[in-house]
Amino acid sequence: MTATRAQDVTVSPAPEQAENIATLLSFMEAHEAKRGTVPAAGFFLSGAGEHDRVELNEQLYDVLKQAVEALSRGQSVSLSARDQEITTQQAGEILGISRPTVVHLIESGEIPAHVPGTVRRKLYLSDVLTYRDEIRARRNAFIAESSARYGDADLEDVDALVAEAREAQ
């Protein structure tokens, strides 16, 4: 059984937007004819405010172009967002720990994982990033608490504090 987490969105062309869609498609096609298929930096989405503008990368441009082409043909467009799966090795690289340590964290239930095939564990990137953020927050809280509690400690007390920190993990 494959574990998937997805969110699907479907957009159908609105008849009153046909002219806007055609204009957008024409703009995209003219740009590609003039400059090639890869968009150069300079495609932006703009809002109503003067500073409401964000640049589109190549991947977003391609998604937008495919959606506009389909809408211009009167087709509905479905966008399916799925969590990216990564390996235990990739998770270790993100977390700055070894692959066996990632496996230990999975087996202890600290990080969720699944086995989509028969052998190899997979993790969702979002779960690994959440775990990383939780670890950072716990580490920062410990440092803040230790600073407040032992702010006046002598350097000789550092070894004892380090040992206490290791036990707390």
Image (tube, rainbow, N blue to C red):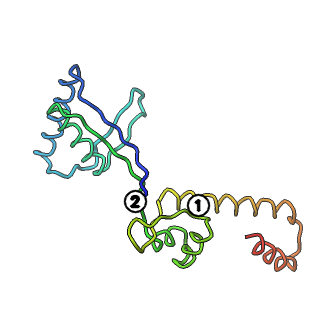
Q: At which x and y percent is residue 143?
A: 75, 63
Q: At which x and y percent is residue 101?
A: 57, 76
Q: Which mark is residue 131?
A: 1
Depth check, front residue: 59 or 124 = 124
Number of marks in the image? 2
Question: Where is mark 2, residue-wise?
Answer: 2
Callout 1 crowding tier (Cα within 10 Å): few <14, some 14–19, many ≥20: some
Callout 2 crowding tier (Cα within 10 Å): few <14, some 14–19, many ≥20: few
Q: At which x and y percent is residue 13?
A: 23, 28
Quarter of the picture containing the C terminus is bottom right
Q: Is residue 81 left or right of residue 113?
A: left
Quarter of the picture containing the N terminus is bottom left
Depth check, front residue: 151 or 130 = 130
Q: Which is more foreground, mark 1 or mark 2?
A: 2
User: Rounded to the nearest whole Å, what is the CA distance between mark 1 and mark 2?
Assistant: 22 Å
- Up the image or down, 13 lies above or below 150; here it is above
